[in-house]
Image (cartoon, helix red, strand yellow):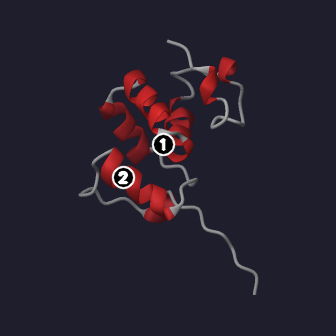
Amino acid sequence: MTIPKSLQGILWSKKTSGLSLTKDKNYLIHQVLMYGSFKDISWLFKTYPMIVIKKEFTKNPVKIYSKPVFNFVKKFILGLEAKKLEEKDYVKTLLRSS
């Protein structure tokens, strides 16, 4: 299975043709969960088993999420509402100037 070119917009830091479903699994999963549409997330679930997506999300966090998206993905997309996850490991914060 190859990575659809339609995902290039949310995988902007690398060319889709140069990505590996195996080696770039963490990058693909987090980018699609944070920036993808429901169609993109559907592709993700067809590409990786839910257990793999949950494992990558919980064991290898990436600090790219906004707080609302993190909570939505955790609770509704992945069904991990009961799982204790450190928000600080996922949610990027913006520094405010004083």
Disc ID at residue 74:
2
For image coordinates 76% across by 81% down, the residue present is 97
Q: Earlier in the sequence, mark 1 or mark 2?
A: 1
Image quadrant where residue 11 sits = top right
Question: Measured along the vertical axis of the image, is residue 69 above or below residue 39?
Answer: below
Q: Residue at x 44, y 29 (%)?
A: 44
Q: Nearer the viewer, residue 46 or 18?
A: 46
Farthest residue, direction bottom: 98
Expressed as whole percent of the image width and height from the top left, the position of residue 98 reads 75, 87
Residue at the disc numbered 1: 33
**How many angstroms separate mark 1 from mark 2 (CA)?**
10 Å
Residue 8 place in picture, x, y as percent: 66, 29
Q: Quadrant of residue 96?
A: bottom right
- Identify whether 4 is placed above or below 68: above
Residue at image coords 51%, 30%: 25
* Number of marks in the rendered image: 2
Q: Amino acid at mark 1?
A: Leu
Q: Is residue 40 left or right of residue 77?
A: right
Q: Is residue 50 left or right of residue 10?
A: left
Vertical arrangement, residue 29 with respect to residue 19, above or below: below
The amino acid on which the numbered mark 2 sits, given as a three-letter code, is: Lys
Residue at disc 2, secondary structure: helix
In screen coordinates, is 15 left or right of 2? right
Q: Position of residue 59 (x, y in %)?
A: 41, 45
Q: Which residue sits at x=48%, y=49%?
A: 61
